[in-house]
Amino acid sequence: MKQVSAMSSPVYRRFFTGSLLSSIGDYVGVTALNWYVLESTSSPFYLGMINFFRLLPALFIGLLGGWLADRFPQRTLLIILYIPILILGAILAWYVAAGQKNMWILSTLVILRGLFDEMEPPVRNALLPDIVPPHGIASGVALYTTMLNVARMIGPALAGIMIARVGVAPLFIFHVFAQLAVFASLFAIPRKSAVPVQEPQASSAGFGAVISFLRSQPRLLFLLILSVCFMLFGFSYSSLVPIYVLQMLQTGPATFGYLLTATAAGAVLGAFALTRIDSKRFLPWTPWFALGFTCSLFVLGFSHYFVLAAIALFLMGLFSQAFRTSIRIVFQLSSPEGLRGRLMSVIMADRGFIPLGVFLASAAAEKVSIASILILMSACCLLCLLGYICLYPRISKEVSSHASNQYS
């Protein structure tokens, strides 16, 4: 199958540009939120609690987004979703600017916004095949992921500099205005491009059809299980970086921003590298991506120096993004038309296990060192990877035979 660049679609280019500006604002906002909580409370527990509530909706609300995406025009759904996102973002900015520090009220605002934030990704992913050429889906997913990580690279560095110079509150205001960019770009998408093509029987079967499909596709089911395990035991590391900066490096917000930028730089490289790999080869490489992430996490647990920490986080960003993106592309390419929204919402719901990992790790950080927690997390990831390999030893043979039929 000849790969086609998604950038050949003018509609995709407009959506891509608006999303880039919006995503920079997202990462500025998340960085500001984490530093604001830690600065206000000096408590790893409250930091974990806020991130738990921020990410908790990913566990269940994305499924609703996928269900809606299979039944209604995705463009219209995205416009509707961004209205409460903008309103709640403005309320949050006002709350921080007013100097309020009640963590439970802050948690309420965060989880309310999260309900709408987490419905957006499966709707957006279901929209992509309608705004890119038929053979450009893999390119569209990989380029969009690369864009997210460019934003992830710029946002934290910008946030770290701005926090050091002007404080936290202006960053929440910046976040709201950046969200307006993607909201405006949605109106540039023609209505006819966003109407989903459905298979009536599949669309009316609910999530039972998704479960049946996954049971008939062991390679996808085992990838989903592996992804969930890594979300739970490994990917919570990003919410622990503020604690790591304070405890092990003993520095401030600028260093925090630079380390997150190093992570994002690795993620950009990882996502971009996937655009150069044939889709048939994603599955055999996925365990190696997982192993690279695990080893990098282990190294981070021993690092007391900025340069070594930056290298470890760069590699973690590279391997984690390659791991996640390869799985999502495989799911995207394997999705029947009428199940795409719900199936993508299931694989993207793996993020819902990150807040549980964040909560457990942050609670443990009240009692033990952050270094011990990072090393324990890497050990758990290694055990999950070994279990994946041992419990499904025929995966390479099945992947090869299925891939030749699925992607040829």
Image (cartoon, rainbow, N blue to C red):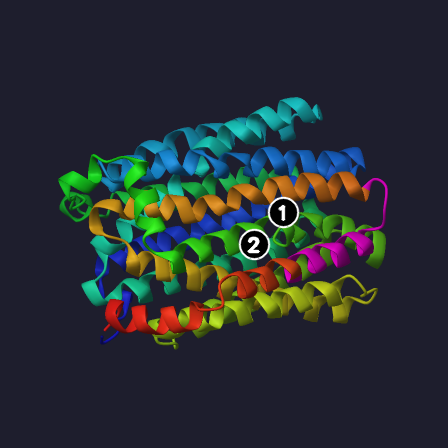
Other-residue count near label 1 (Cα within 10 Å), few / some / many at <14 / 14–19 / ≥20: many
Q: In this view, does 119 lie above or below 189?
A: above
SS at mark 1 in the image: helix
Q: Residue 155 carries which label?
A: 2
State which quadrant residue 272 falls in: bottom left
Q: Give the range drawn in magenta.
A: 366-382
In-image side of 9 versus 90 (left or right): left
Q: Quadrant of the C terminus?
A: bottom left
- Specify whether residue 207 is painted magenta: no
Mark pair 1, 2: CA separation: 8 Å
Residue 397 point in image, percent of width and height: 39, 73
Instruction: Say which residue label 1 marks.
Output: 31
Q: Is residue 183 left or right of residue 99?
A: left
Residue 249, compared with residue 116, is above or below; it is: below
Given the image, on which type of amino acid does mark 2 rest?
Answer: Gly
Q: Quadrant of the N terminus?
A: bottom left
Q: Residue 11 in the image: state x and y as whole percent.
A: 23, 56
- Please, what is the dominant secondary structure of the magenta stretch? helix
Q: Does 118 sit left or right of 378 as displayed?
A: left
